[in-house]
Image (cartoon, rainbow, N blue to C red):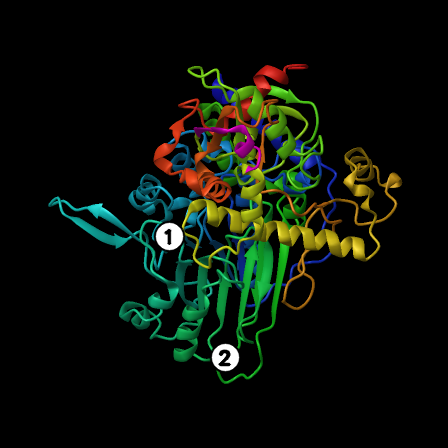
Amino acid sequence: MRYIALLSLLTGVSASQHSLKLPEPTRQLEWKDVNFLSTSDIHGWLLGHQHATWPEPNYSGDYGSLASFATHMRRVAHDKGVDLLLVDAGDHHDGSGLVSSSSDAAGKAEDIFSMLPYDIITIGNHELYHYEDALEEYRNKGRWNGRYVTSNVNITIRSKDGSFQSVPLGEQYLKLDTEQGRKVTAFGIIFNCKGISIQKPSKLAKEPWFLEAIKDKPDYFVLAGHMPARGETAEFGPIFDAIREAHPKVPIYIFGGHTHVRDCVQYDDRSIGVVPGRYLETVAFTSSSLPQDDDEKPLDVARRYIDGNPVSYKWHTNTSDEEFDLPIGRNISLALLRLASNLNISTPLGIAPHDYFLERHPYGHPRSVLTVFSDQVLPHTIFDKERNETRVIIGNAGSLRFDLFQGRFDRNDELTVSPFTSKFLYVQLPAGLARNITEQMNKSGASKLLPSEPTTKSEEEDRVRRTYNEWMAEQWEDYLTQGGDDHLYDQVESQRIFKDDESDIPKKPRTMGFVTKDSCPGKGDDIEHYPVPHVGNQPDFVQTPFPDVNNDEIIDVVSMDFALDDFLAAVNVLDPAIDLKEAHMKPYAEGLEINVVFGMYAKEMWQAGL
């Protein structure tokens, strides 16, 4: 009976996705000699985006839909007699309930991820923050059939004789033959982040084994790397340069990630680097000619950022509703629903009364997720039963990852909004000092230049968040500069404009979405969108409403351990004589973590209509 129920739910989800009145593409893909589909930073969004608030419907395809799409695309490539490789650039952990709801959820989700046979796949920093996660990746790398390549990542394991040894976590490099008989040499690289054991790409480029691996000339090289294609953490350069020294004319195809943006750049006229965004929102299609060394022409390249939904997938594969869903896709979708059921992440916890946005409204606005977090969720959920003292709670805005949408709110939504496992600590301080801590933390956070090599997970996550927000802000600012209407700030009005009835739509494009500017020729976005409204200069830290107390009264000041370094620094700037250290902090509401507080609040305050 359970199988039948899941199959019925799968059919309902599929029908709902297919019935969405989404815009169709208007331009055929530019197939060439060498073609790629690439993904990155999926972070467990294998169920797709399930809410009706724009731009979520643009990304309503689940991982099963992607699998059907990729399989159809491989058929198209075969019929055309061209190469098509499927590449992923890492970060599968920390995101939705499928990967963040239990200690073994990510491994189970990874088993489903591997049901789609990628040609080249690499690791992300979120698979490396915890040794147990990295060890699970190492022990189960066989699920990728030798295609999991981690050229500069080692892990220390205990050998059979009891000694410890450092070994490559995945394959150091790949040499493969495509269906068209072309020879490919591929590497998987991650930037020099905090992790298990990561070698700087600049050092990797000098390793004897690496130089030996690039010695033989392939038809082309592929670099899959969990880092951006350009910017301060783009560390493809040393690898690229080493290959170029050995092979000045061989094409190099680079596929990046990490910063969650769509981007494209060419390092020279025989290369292209593409970054496909995040959260299964985008599947990037990259195509290129394949000239010979004696041909002086540059690569003829193109890229397309395809919105992750069945409407776009079917259009580009010229398939009908009846033809599109293949057994591989249906099996993956069913496996995802089984896993969601087993993890108990689909049971409604409440009914959210409104949409609450992370970046569309300023902090303080009633429809801001940050406002709800600081003014409602934290005060109603964070209590220490052993203490009845007056307290203020300081929260890290970076612990919130996504918007919160009107309607059904379940454990998966909760972890989508806040997937991290940060705990709470407290110290007793005078209220007069405590009043200024959050402001001081924001002063430091807003003004400091992040180090080129972040030393903490918090710093790295903050940099990703800032990069993505700058990208989104640029799209919105360009739109306003070009005469766009800022009434899209208004939630009700924006939903009215983007209804399905085109007769009420004043102009096209008619849906919110990404508006990408990159450094490659031609237009990258597959569908033309309005940009998503964006408010900049959001605080890094927020606090609960301050209690009505005298400045000399001693109160509990609660901080999330994720931002403890920032908290300690702020207190010591405000009063150096305190010399506050981590050892002075004590657990508060012990056992409670940030990734359950929205659900606790929903069970108490959002029960109407459930």
Residue under numbered circle 2: 292
Secondary structure state at the residue bearing disc 1:
loop
CA neighbours of label 1 inside 10 A, class few (<14), some (14 to 19), many (20+): many
Q: Is residue 94 left or right of residue 159?
A: right
Q: Which residue is mark 1?
A: 148
The C terminus lies in quadrant: top right
**Vertically, is 279 above or below 208?**
above
Whether 387 is drawn above or below 139: the answer is above
Q: Position of residue 387 (x, y in %)?
A: 44, 17
Looking at the rendering, the stretch of residues picked out in magenta corresponds to 425-436
Q: Nearer the viewer, mark 2 or mark 1?
A: 1
Q: Position of residue 463 (x, y in %)?
A: 52, 51
User: Along the horizontal axis of the image, is 132 left or right of 407?
Assistant: left
Name which of mark 2 and mark 1 comes first in the sequence.
1
Residue at position x 34%, y 44% from top? Answer: 134
The x and y percentages for residue 56 are 66, 39
Q: Amino acid at mark 1?
A: Tyr
Residue 175 - label: none
Q: Which is nearer the eye, 423 or 557?
A: 557
Residue 566 vs 29, above or below: the answer is above
Quarter of the image where one finds residue 431:
top right
Inspect the image, locate mark 2, and give the three-letter code of the amino acid beneath it.
Gln
Q: CA distance from mark 2 to mark 1?
A: 29 Å
